[in-house]
Image (cartoon, grey):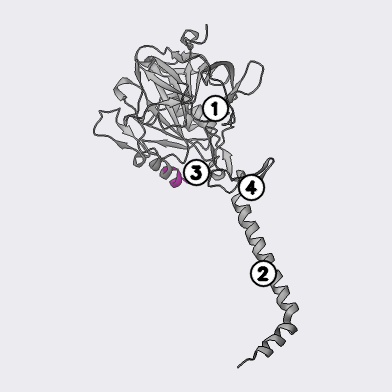
Amino acid sequence: MISAGSIEMFLKRSWPQIAGGAVLILLLCGTSSYLSIRGTFRKADDGIMPPLPTEATSSTDMALRRLDGLLVADGEAVLQPYAVMVENAPEARPLMGPARANLVVEAPVEGGITRLMLVFDATSTAEQIGPVRSARPYFVEFAVALGAVYAHCGGSPDGLARIRKTEGFRDLDEFSNGIRFWRSSKRSAPHNIYTSMERLRAGSAAKEWSEGSVVAPWRYLNPDDGVAPGDITDVRVPYGGTFTVVWSYDVETGAYTRSQAGSVQRDADGTVVTSTNVIILLTEERVLDSVGRLKIRTTGSGKAWLFRDGQRFDVTWHRPEGGWLRFETTDGNDVLFRPGKTWISIITESSMAPASSVE
């Protein structure tokens, strides 16, 4: 049995070592507490503040997505986009996909009909897109500029020729990639072809296409920037007849709602079609054949109008051969878009310019 005297003698002889150990323990505990605090708060110019409300551990883990300017995880900022040709004929409505696309390019085809190229980010979960229709050369040119996988069902002679002569073009034609599409029994042909992002990603993976995007990003406003909304609440794009479009600005949401043929446009599942930015782009067309197929100029420059935050901006569009669209203000600066979806409607006559904004 150890006596009280023995314990006292041990403490006297070992006191320096015990004291040093105690100091070390206190230092370690303090460091642990400091690291714990650093993991909960970050230093700011005006003191200590909570971390940003995001899964990323720091702002360096986030980046602006090239396709729409939204803040996403850094690894998702430059993923390959997917462009799908979707028809807009009355027989095809309601469509599936316009409400979920990140970017839309709308342009006339033969007979005064308009057609849509819906562009989706690679992370999209859209389960049904369509009806899918044929390619046209000017849509192919935009797909090339985006570095997109291009999904379509056949095409005009010029559209298919443009695809064939473009080296490295990422082509998913339904004719040769039928497994990536399906035909709905609820629709009559040719308005019954659909695809999904899951099938398109599988098609891209099977062909071992790289995932990088080549699109040059636009400039975007800071999401926190306060912008006083303008008083232009309705923008009319008179394509004609059932294709005439009206965009209505909602100051509460900051988005434009699309109406077509006098009714609010919705996807087949009821989702309203909206856009954060609306571009009306003026160019020229030329009829190519007896069918009425068109050649539309997509390079060079011309007039355009940007509608954002209830405001109108008179701008100039530019596009070099093989490059993506760029928009400049009247003083030569890059246009600032609001982060989010952009819808580009291409018009080919000055009389079709947005009625509420040009005069």
Q: Which residue is mark 4?
A: 42
Q: Which sits earlier in the primary sequence, circle 4 or circle 3? A: 4
Give how far apart the Cα atoms at labels 2 and 1 are: 54 Å
The amino acid on which the numbered mark 2 sits, given as a three-letter code, is Ile
Tag nearer the camera, 1 or 3? 1
Q: Is residue 189 left or right of residue 157?
A: left
Q: Which residue is mark 2?
A: 25
The amino acid on which the numbered mark 1 sits, given as a three-letter code, is Arg
Task: Please state which of residues 87 and 70 is positioned toward the viewer in this rendering.
Answer: 70
Q: Quadrant of residue 238?
A: top left
Task: Please state which of residues 65 and 137 is positioned toward the viewer in this rendering.
Answer: 65
Is disc 3 placed on a helix, strand or loop?
Answer: loop
The amino acid on which the numbered mark 3 sits, given as a three-letter code, is Trp
Q: Which residue is mark 3?
A: 209
**Extreme top residue here?**
359
Is disc 2 placed on a helix, strand or loop?
Answer: helix
Q: Is residue 42 left or right of residue 153?
A: right
Q: Position of residue 228 (x, y in %)?
A: 56, 20
Q: Which residue is mark 1?
A: 338
Up-down relation of residue 154 to residue 3 (above or below)? above
Up-down relation of residue 42 to residue 285 (above or below)? below
205 drawn magenta: yes
Is disc 4 placed on a helix, strand or loop?
Answer: strand
Q: Quadrant of residue 269?
A: top left
Residues shaded magenta: 203-209
Which residue is at a point 40% across and 16% down the rendered structure image?
245
